[in-house]
Image (cartoon, grey):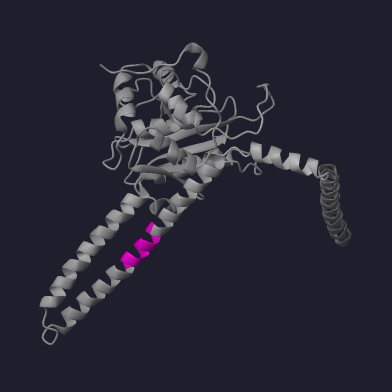
Amino acid sequence: AIEITMADNNGAGNWCLIDSDPRVFTELIKGFGVSGVQVEELWSLEKAEFEKLNPIHGLVFLFKWRPGEETVGTLVKDSRQIYFAKQVINNACATQAIISVLLNCNHKDIQLGEMLSRFKEFSADFDPTMRGLSLSNMNVIRQVHNSFARQQMFEFDNLSNKSEEAFHFIAYVPVDGRLYELDGLKDGPIDLGKYQEDWVESVKPILETRMRSYATDEIRFNLMAIVSDRKIKLQTDIEKLQSNLSELNGKLAKMDTKKDTDAYLKLKNECTSIEVRISEVNNLLQLEEDKRQRYKMERMKRDHNYLPLIVQLLKCLAKDGRLVELTENAEKRQKQLTAAALERKKRKLDSANDNSDDKSSKM
């Protein structure tokens, strides 16, 4: 029997906001028990940016949500071949987008783990709404998600701000030769058509069109790729290169350098090329290990509660009679910085007006 731990009704909506950060999402995936995969941020849509991350199993896109936006593509009503779940609560769209990619991926590098494998089997015959309800009520998934909550010094009443802008995560995945958009706010997956060999090339124009539809000063977009574990992939590449190098060195040892000079030099050049490539991949592996160590330190800093330290420092300053003076100096410094910023802005506007007047007089 498949046992799914469900939350009570009062806890179903207690999902916190988490940062759109590849480190956070990579740790989130590990928390679900998934292995062989990580998340990497993309800074442009250039082909080289994607190629260095291959294989890419899915994309997660963050953008400012706008009501009434037209759907590009065809809504799939019968989504049994695609795992799609409706988003039924707030703040869970990031986690839902990532899980949507994972549950639609059948790559050999990725092991879903017991929890997600059992959940996928358990909810296989559910409609999208029931899948969304089941997902949002799973205690273990919600607990992992909430473990990445932003640290706050103080707790405030949750006052709704209707004017606050809303941001939303969606996913793009290739399934059986077709490209799909998975948006938990839609009624089903969106079929974006067939793709050729590289499915990512079919996504890029869609993303470009979506971003161009916003005002020119809107730059708050975030694109992340769900890729195979970089460390494992680089280690595998090194093993293959070392195996090839060993094989070539074996051939070189058996060759007569006087009789087979040209062939010997050719193999020697191949060995040198492989050695250079091994050095390059080792450098990439070191960068990956350094990045993971940095992520670990950032997580420790993020999870640490600095409030007791701050309170104790304030008490010491007050005891020494320095707190009031330092506070007044800080306020004075802030006023000076604000005045300087306003003055720079005024000079910039005056300069722009002068240039405009000069152009008008020349005309």
Q: Is residue 176 above or below residue 337?
A: above
Q: Is residue 101 left or right of residue 344?
A: left
Quadrant position of residue 112: top left
- Where does the image place residue 152, in percent across and percent down from the top left? 63, 33
Which quadrant, please, contains the N terminus? top left
Nearer the observer, 29 or 345: 29
Q: Is residue 67 left or right of residue 171?
A: right
Residue lying at the far top in this picture: please name it.
Answer: 9
Magenta-drawn stretch contains 281: yes
Q: Residue at x 87, y 54 (%)?
A: 350
Main SS type for the magenta part?
helix
Residues in magenta?
277-285
Residue 188 visible in the snapshot: no
Nearer the observer, 191 or 9: 9
Residue lying at the far front in this picture: please name it.
Answer: 319
Nearer the observer, 79 or 271: 271
Magenta-drawn stretch contains 45: no
- Where does the image place residue 238, in percent across and percent down from the top left? 28, 59
Residue 249 visible in the snapshot: yes
Q: Residue at x 18, y 72 (%)?
A: 249
